[in-house]
Amino acid sequence: MNLNIETSRRIELIDITSEVKEEVRISGVREGVCIISTRHTTAGIIVNENENGLREDILNMLERLVPQGAGYRHDRIDNNADSHLKAILLGSSEALPIIKGELELGTWQSIFFAEMDGPRNRAVNLTILKTE
């Protein structure tokens, strides 16, 4: 199944936790694994705390590590090399356990779609595997 996401900024974190939880509920899987992934090479999937300051810190850290317009070779083609490099740092998927029909997340954990080259229409793939 897919979640469709419309991003509104070049770089942003979008909390998709409630949508993923709902798909797990609908699946009826009691024990298993939910794999959250994206096929986009300028986006990522991460798990972390959904706190405004921390979200800004994450995006600021990525900009410091991989600044836009730093002379990357790929910029000659699309002018978005920094987006690809940031996405590499984040990763394109997360696998989370399903226990007793619920997505197993820590108290402060949320699932984010990380847009690095928006605004765009994006897709997140959910693969729910039953292990019971």
Image (spheres, rainbow, N blue to C red):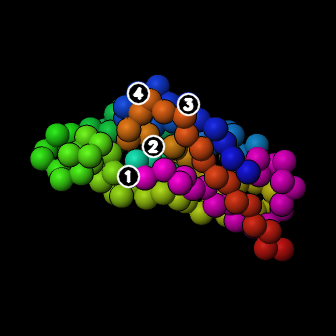
> Could you say which is closer to the camera, residue 95 or residue 126?
126
Q: Which residues are magenta?
A: 23-41
Counting from the top left corner in percent of width and height, residue 48 is at 47, 48
Residue 90 occupies quadrant: bottom left
Q: Nearer the viewer, mark 2 or mark 3?
A: 3
Q: Are marks 2 and 3 in contact (CB under 8 Å)?
A: no
* Whether residue 10 can be seen here: yes
Residue picked out by circle 1: 87
Question: What separation in Å lies between label 1 and label 3 (alpha carbons)?
Answer: 17 Å
Amino acid at circle 3: Glu
Tell me which numbered mark, 2 or 3, is placed earlier along the sequence: 3
Counting from the top left corner in percent of width and height, residue 101 is at 81, 57
Amino acid at circle 2: Ala
* Whether residue 15 can be seen here: no
- The residue shown at (54%, 34%) is 121
Residue picked out by circle 4: 9
